């Protein structure tokens, strides 16, 4: 998305849906959820459940999902699950400088697996 399109999208007024929520949105991700959820201000945005673990890569996240999805879903009725993993597969966080950098020119060995 270009900068112009993003600015145009952000400038539009957001109309909250008036329908009752039928599915609970659940987002499985890494550290980014810790910061994004602070910007959720509307009741609809605050209904999002964030399941996250800082520093987990896609392999670790999918393993966690396979192992604990049944028990986690037991706490909620109907969910709409969104998986947003992979950032930590190609970035490194330096605790000393607090910078995130890309890992070298290594190829990502990604092979989709069935759950």
Image: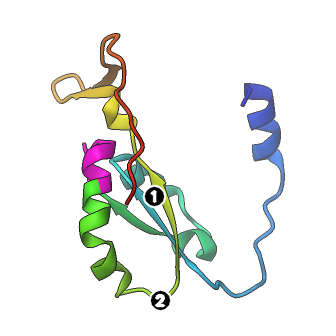
Residue 54 is at least partly visible in this image? no
The quarter of the image holding the C terminus is bottom left
Residue located at (74% from left, 26% from top)? 2
Taking depth in this image into account, of 26 and 67 the one nearest to the observer is: 67
Residue 52, horizontal then vertical, whole percent: 32, 58
The quarter of the image holding the N terminus is top right
On whether residue 56 falls in the magenta region, the answer is yes
Taking depth in this image into account, of 97 and 103 the one nearest to the observer is: 103
Q: Which residue is mark 2?
A: 77
What distance separates the C-alpha of mark 1 from that of mark 2? 24 Å
Along the polypeptide, which appears first: circle 1 or circle 2? 1
Residue located at (32% from left, 35% from top)? 88
Taking depth in this image into account, of 109 and 26 the one nearest to the observer is: 109
Q: Residues within 10 Å of mark 1 (few under 14, many from 20)?
A: few
The extreme front residue here reads 114
Residue located at (28% from left, 81% from top)? 71
Residue 74 is at least partly visible in this image? yes
Residue 39, horizontal then vertical, whole percent: 52, 56
Residue 45, by quadrant, is bottom right
Taking depth in this image into account, of 115 and 7 the one nearest to the observer is: 115
The relative height of residue 11 versus residue 53 in the rendered view (above or below) is above
On whether residue 89 falls in the magenta region, the answer is no
Stretch of the chain drawn in magenta: 53-62
Disc ID at residue 110: none
Q: Which residue is mark 1?
A: 38
Residue 37, horizontal then vertical, whole percent: 46, 59
Query: Mark 1: which secondary structure?
Result: helix
The relative height of residue 28 versus residue 12 in the rendered view (above or below) is below
The relative height of residue 21 versus residue 86 in the rendered view (above or below) is below
Q: Residues within 10 Å of mark 2 (few under 14, many from 20)?
A: few
């Amino acid at each position: 998305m270009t900068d112009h399109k993003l600015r145009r999208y952000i400038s539009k007024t957001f109309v909250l849906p008036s329908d009752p929520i039928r599915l609970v949105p659940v987002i499985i991700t890494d550290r980014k959820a810790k910061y994004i959820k602070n910007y959720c201000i509307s009741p609809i945005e605050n209904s999002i459940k964030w399941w996250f673990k800082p520093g987990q890569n896609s392999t670790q996240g999918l393993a966690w999902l396979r192992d604990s999805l049944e028990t986690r879903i037991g706490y909620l009725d109907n969910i709409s699950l969104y998986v947003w993993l992979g950032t930590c597969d190609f970035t490194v966080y330096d605790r000393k400088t607090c910078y995130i950098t890309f890992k070298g020119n290594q190829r990502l060995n990604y092979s989709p697996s069935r759950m």
